[in-house]
Image: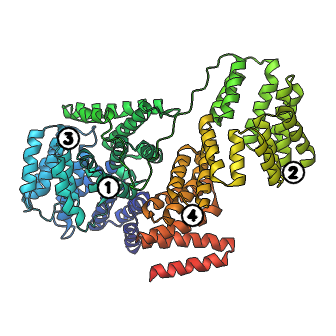
Amino acid sequence: MDEIADLVDRAQSLPYGEAKTTLLETALQRAEATGDRSLVWAVRMELTEAYQYGAEHAKAFAAFARCLADHDAEPGGFGDWSLHNVLWHFKWIVGDLRRFPEVPLARTHQMLDDMERRYRESGNGMHAVYAARCAHAAHLGDFALADDLYHRWTTTPRDILSDCEGCDPTSKAFYLTLRGRDEEAVELAEPVLRGELTCHVQPQSILTTLLPAYLRTGRFAEAAHAHRVAYRAMRGDANEVEEIATHLWFCAVSGNLARGLEIFTRERPLLEKAPSPGAAMWFAAAGALLLRLLREQGHAQPGDAAEEAALTARAREIAARFDARNGTPEQGRRVEEWLTARPLAEHVPLDPRARHSPPPLPPAPLPPAHTPEELLDLAEEAWQRGRLDDAKAAWERYDALDPVPSLEARRADGRGLTAMVAGDTGEALAEWRRAAELHTDEERRQSSLGRLGLLLCQLGQEEEGLPLVEASTAALRNPNAVVRLAHAYLTLGREADAERVLAAAPPSPGGLLLLAGLRGDVETASRARDAMRAADDREGLARACVRHAHALLDAGADHEGALAAYDEAVAYAPVAERAGIHHERGSLRLQLGRVPEALDDLVEAVAQYVAEGEMEPVRYARLSLAEAYARLGRFAEAEITAEEALDAFREAGDAETCASIESFIANLTE
């Protein structure tokens, strides 16, 4: 019995999710072995709640049905509060039933009738019953009935079974926005938001509900605030998939496509963990809307069209199942409203001090390719633009054709490039030596020798490598050769020589980027950024934006310009490079006092560093994250994060930093 009590206590101390649910499932198994019916019932009720808030609503049905049957078999046999708990859980279950199209409509009606009967027989009021019936009527599109039930709901006194003082107004505001009564929704919610909300889903739930009303009534500052506060509280939570969908919708129709794309990319895995088909339907519809608007405004990325089509089909398929079950077209109508929505505002700034960061521009189209030579041309052009996946795909298409002996030298060059990226320097050296031997075109032969020489320098074989690079540069005199030579000099620690050759050569995107790193001035960094944009080199552009941000900060003036540069860098950078950019942008935001936005960046940086196994930078990111938590008054999270950083600095043997962190933690606990 002590072990079961300990399992339940440990579960109650955890947030809703897999860990909490697993502990309670274990506790239930142990309780069932005791044969103690009251204990089993109490643990199963705890588990029903864990399923409800842990994104496993389907499991809650069976658990609640068993609790209800046991309660009916032995009324009053499970403690004074057992009836109250059953009636409270009823609200969750009847709400969830409508979100599963496979549940027959008659079953939902039966449960609603059973709920009302039990409430009346127990002497409780009808406030929660009218709320549940109103939501169900609205789901079916029977607004004549829903309006009548809404009137009964709002005129019936609250009682002990009513939703909390944050959640009940949220449900009312949702109905009012659904009916287009936006001003009433805002008026209803304002006193609630001014009060103290202690429910764990508030205030993020009511703020999310108000987003359509805020937008449609022109309350853009309120809408931006609601989005920032609410999304931060629910990000990554599978139980909030439907609410996150509303934030995607908001970003799509408020001109914040870049922000919407960032959220969609982060939260897309949650679609497969949605707590119900209804939640999945709304996330799919919101994602499809976002991708459609990106496409229509010329910002589609490779693969977006297929994703948009798949999400659209998924949303419509689930809506069709609801409509078939309900016998009304209401869910299909609402889904189509989202799928075909138009922007409600050109751009709602999420931070009045921030510049508008546009979504990433789509890459310029690559030329068509059919013949073996065209495929190699395509691969080489894609490589020059930094589009490595497109280059590899073109080489793979070439390899599927019959070999062309006269083109084998060019293919060897390509194999060397892919081997170098994969870290196989031995294969890269062998392929470039072979390419140099096979080339009959002197320019291509010199390019192969230049690549070979640079790699030899990087491997510490300067005596053989540097003459190859220098000779190649002298023979070719083109931007790529100059950049290779500058890289070789930098590898050997000869920064002055690198700057000299870059400054003397005609400007090129890669050369300007290197030169910006050497000089650190705003003017060169700005030129590099513009050149990378013009060259359509997206990875290069991300790095140039970071260089530009560094130059602006070193100049000590344009913080807003630096933030805008970081915004563009995040949009274009490869996933593996985003952690550092989030870290830098978060640190700058923290320095500028924009702590909520800094928190978003630093959470992302820590998560990505950990995923990539970057243990050195993550400890510094955690320090900044702990500071952000503390400045927001989230002291428990600040302490946990600081202790994680402390462990890492202890392993690194940094006694001075450890002492500083220990002092920080001591101040928190005071």
Tag 2: residue type? Gly
- Depth check: give the residue in front, 101 or 61: 101
Q: Is residue 580 above or below residue 250?
A: below
At 62% from the left edge and 76% from the top edge, which residue is drawn? Answer: 657
Where disc 3 sits, the SS reads: helix
Q: Which residue is mark 3?
A: 139
Q: Is residue 411 left or right of residue 121?
A: right
Residue type of the residue flagged with mark 4: Ala
Ranked by sequence position, the earlier of labels 4 and 1 is 1
Identify the residue position indicated by label 1 in the image. Answer: 226
Badge nearest the viewer, 2 or 3: 2
Which image quarter: residue 170? Answer: bottom left
Q: Secondary structure at mark 4?
A: helix
Question: In the rendered structure, which disc, 1 or 2, sits on the residue that comes first in sequence?
Answer: 1
Q: CA distance from mark 1 to mark 2?
A: 56 Å
Quadrant housing residue 482: top right
